[in-house]
């Protein structure tokens, strides 16, 4: 193997540098760009790095997306960004007692869940995200019902 072995921290720093300077829309593109820099990794490794770095996929027009670092500032910024993500990528919200399930477009659950975590709402115990599904745990059934109404309002804009 020609590429030199680097640690996880260094590899993830390289990934952040790459997505800040280039428009990368797929994991395969990211693997290729890392390879050009002499860092040889599998797509599975890049997928784990993307999840750990909590990268989000942002729309860039004509149905295309690019990876980006999740940006968040104050609570109003988070709520505004959450609204945009809900309007663009959330397809459905369902609830059973204090558990809410949010369905997103493929690949967008992690970004939405990150902002839900950054929202710092007391009634949200925590979130768990996959590729297109987020589990939100509310403290009580009543708070779950209230969150469901808020999530539906965010979807409508």
Image (spheres, rainbow, N blue to C red):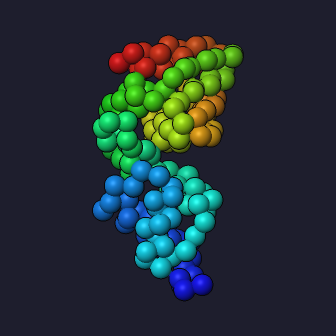
| Residue 122 spot, x, y in % from top left | 53, 30
86 or 125: nearer the viewer:
86
Image quarter of residue 128: top right
Where residue 153 appears, x then y in whole percent? Answer: 42, 15
Q: Quadrant of residue 82?
A: top left
Relative height, residue 24 to residue 9 (above, below): above
Is residue 136 shown to the viewer in this render?
yes
Q: In front: 19, or 129? A: 19
Looking at the picture, tell me which residue is in the foreground, 30 or 87.
Answer: 30
Quadrant location of the N terminus in the rendered image: bottom right
Position in image of residue 121 (x %, y %): 49, 31
Q: Nearer the viewer, residue 9 or 62?
A: 62
Q: Is residue 109 above or below residue 43?
A: above
Residue drawn 54% across the image and 36% down it: 106
Residue visible at 37% across and 41% down? Answer: 64
Residue drawn at 39 percent across, 43 percent down? 65
| Whether residue 13 is visible | no
| Furthest residue toward right | 97
Quarter of the image for the C terminus: give it: top left
Is residue 90 depicted above or below 7 in this figure?
above
- Name the residue: 46% across, 70% down: 34
Left or right relative to 113: residue 133: right
112 over 49 or under it: above or below: above
Q: Is residue 56 left or right of residue 77?
A: right
The count of marks equals: 0
Q: Is residue 109 left or right of residue 67?
A: right
């Amino acid at each position: 193997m020609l590429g030199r072995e680097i640690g996880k921290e260094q590899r993830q720093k390289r990934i952040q540098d790459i997505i800040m300077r280039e428009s990368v829309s797929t994991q395969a593109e990211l693997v290729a760009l890392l390879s050009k820099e002499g860092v040889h990794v599998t797509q599975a490794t890049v997928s784990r790095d993307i999840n750990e770095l909590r990268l989000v996929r942002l729309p860039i027009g004509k149905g295309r997306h690019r990876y980006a670092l999740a940006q968040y500032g104050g609570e109003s910024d988070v709520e505004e960004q959450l609204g945009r993500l809900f309007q663009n990528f959330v397809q459905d919200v369902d609830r059973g007692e204090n558990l809410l399930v949010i369905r997103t477009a493929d690949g967008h659950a992690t970004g939405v869940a990150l902002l839900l975590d950054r929202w710092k709402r007391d009634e949200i115990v925590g979130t768990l995200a996959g590729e297109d599904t987020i589990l939100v745990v509310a403290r009580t059934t009543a708070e779950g019902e209230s969150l469901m109404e808020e999530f539906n309002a965010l979807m409508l804009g």
